[in-house]
Each structure stands twice: as C-alpha cells, then as structure tokens.
Image: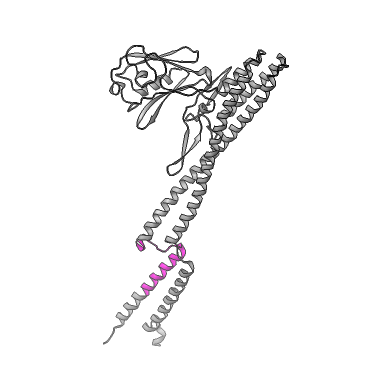
Amino acid sequence: MRVSNSYIFFSLKNQLSSNLENLYNSQVKVNSGKKYVLPSDDPTSAVTALRIKHSLNLNSYYKERQNYTKPYLQIADTQLTTIINTIRTVKVDLNMASNSTNDNSQLAIVATKIDKAIDSIVTTANAKYNNTFLFGGYGTNTTPFVRTGDQVKYNGSGHTVQQEINKDIFADVMIPGSKIFETHTVDSTIGLASPDAKLSTMLNSVGSPYSFSIKTGSGTPATFSVNYTTDSLQDIVTRINNSGVDVKANIKEANGMAYLTLQSKIVGESGALTITDDSSGNGLLKAISLADENAAITGTQSSYSNGLLDTLIAAKNKLQIGDTTGLSDLIAKIDSANDNILNITANVGYEIQRIETAQSFSSDEEFRLKELLSDTEGIDSIGAITELSTLQNAYEAALATSARIMKLSLLNYI
C-alpha cells in the first residue's frame, strides 16, 4: 500500500504538535509549581484547593482580629495594675493618718495626697489606645470619667465590648468603667418584643398619657411623659438621654426581647437612683417591672458595694477637717473595692491568655493548611523537571527524525 508524502507530513505534524503541547504543559507546571494549569485539568484537586484557600483566608482574618485585640487588653492590664498600685499607696497614707499622734496639718498633707491620687486614678481610667477609650464600654469616643470637685461622672456605657477571635469564640476586650468604679444600674425584668413598636401594641391595660420621674442621688427629679399610642420603648430611651439628667438609658436585647436599663452617670453612693412611676393605673415602668405600685424599684438593682472613688473622696474630706473617726471602715471599703479591681484585672489576664492560645492555634492551622494546599496542587519538583527534560529530548528527537524522513533540506537535490 502506497503512503503519500502528504499523509506522512500530516501525521508527523500532528505528532509534533502533540509533543509540543505536552512540553508546554510540563513547562507551565514547572514554572507555576502546580499540578494543573486549568481547574478542568483536575476538577477534584481544584475544588479541594479552593476550600483550603477559603479556610486560609478565614484563618488570616481571625489572626488579624487576635493581633488587633491583644494590645487593648495588654494596655488595660497595665492601667489596672497602675490603679492597684495607687490604691496600695493610698492605704499606706490612710493607715498613717489613722495614728492619733498626727496633727491637722499632717492630716491635710495626707488629704492632698489622696486628692491627687483620685485625679491620677481618673486619668488612668481615661486611658486610650488606637484613639479609643479603653474603659468606656460602647462609648469608645467619649471621655469615660470626668471629675468635678467631689463628684465623678461616668459617660460611658455599661456594656462589655467583645471581639470574635475565632469562629464563634469571643473575648471580652474592653471592660466598662462602671464595673471598675461601680455605678448604680437598674434593669427591667420584663422585656418587650420590640424596642421600636408602639407601646399600645405590646402592653395591655395602660393609662395614657401619664408620666414618671427619675432622680440621681439628692438631685432634682426629672419628669418624663409617656403616650402609649405614639411612643415606643426606643422613644422613651431617647427622651431620657436627651434630657440632661445624670442617667444613661439603654435597651438591652436578650432572648429576642428588649429590656430597659437605667445607669447612673454619677459614680459611687451619691449616684443612687430613685424611680417614681405614676401612682395610679398601670404605668410603663410598672408594666416592665422597673417600679411597683409604691414607686419602689423592683427591677434588678446593681449590688452596689462601696465604689473606690467615692470612698477615697469621703476619706479625703474627713482628713481635710482633721476627722480620723471611721477611717478604719473606709480602709475596709477600699479593700473591698480593690478586690473588685483585682478580680477584673485577673479576668483581663485570662482574656489575654485566651487570645494567645487562639494565636498559637491559628499559626498551627495556617501551617497545616499550607501543607495540605501544597499536597493538593503542588508538584514533585524533581519528578516534574525530569519529565520536562524527557519531553524536551523527545521533542527535539522527533524534530530531527521528521526532518530526515521528509528530506526537507535542498542539499538532497543538488
């Protein structure tokens, strides 16, 4: 059977094209370090690699959260330790002042030291990191503590700020100052289904309009009117917060319900809250169990136990007039307040440890995922280079053979 030159040429051309394509693919694999050029070359490995890359991106996100969060807690730990050291110094001064041999001038010196210690503690509690106040709760852009004479106001929220440091794992990052220097808070125990719905749609047998009042310490009560037809719980919160009264109103959402929370802005005993509801009918605060028929608070009042700042102010005022009676009781209250701060500091240290554990886990996870990705889409470098060399030699040999078979050189016809 006769085979034409055109058929031979066509066959050689196809073979050379196939060899060249194999050589090209091998070169791409060596250059890229991957087993496949297109996902269609190995769909199973390509899908697996995409999943691993998604896990790597997620892991990288949580590593950024961990690295971002940790300094906040480290600086908070330093500031709390500074406050504890200041308390220790104050206690030494108070124990010295309780000595009956001290005259009024010496007591006045101690009073001045305590006054400066109060300023120092307030300044420390207003510490910032990354332009954010550490002890303001959600109020990260507002100076948390402001001292005016013998009164200290807390302008932050009562909420602990959290950050997700791994999937569904949260760390307490910023502790509100109200937990450090205790402020009075009252929480309603009956929640509403929505903070924005009109009160008339959620509460039955209520009088409208009516009013209630809130008083902080010995201040003047502030009166607020309520219209059940037009007002929502959020409207009441906004009205309280815009009134100028020394109370911060918030809505706390839990288990799908909205609860009203009132927090005194005055730190210490002088910030006690008095809530008076309408004496007739079923008023709002009674309906949500914030005040009963006798205008007494029935919500959950924070267990106030001798805040540090007001105790120091009380000690300072006593010493300024040369009064040393009851100093031992004040020292005991300072010890109690110090224990509270020590517990908070321990919790901050615990959160730092949790983040460090998460960082270690994320680093290990990154190494494991990168190894898995390399196994999934990476090549055996030595084997790939050997294959490339073999294909290169085969292609060059095919070219030489083809040239001889086709006798393409004009020298053959001279």
- Give the magenta part as a residue range: 16-42
Nearest the eye: 123 or 353? 353
List x then y, in percent, for residue 394. Answer: 42, 77
List x then y, in percent, for residue 45. Answer: 38, 60
**Model colouring:** one colour
Q: Residue at x 55, y 23 (%)?
A: 307
Nearest the eye: 232 or 21? 232
Predominant SS of the magenta segment: helix
> Can the viewer see residue 128?
no
Residue 80 to residue 317: above or below? below
Nearest the eye: 67 or 97? 97
Q: Is residue 251 magenta?
A: no
Q: Quadrant of residue 10?
A: bottom left
Q: Quadrant of residue 168?
A: top left
Locate the N terminus by quadrant.
Answer: bottom left
List x then y, in percent, for residue 387. Answer: 44, 72
> Can the viewer see residue 94?
yes
Residue 358 to residue 220: above or below? below
Q: Farthest residue in the left direction? A: 1
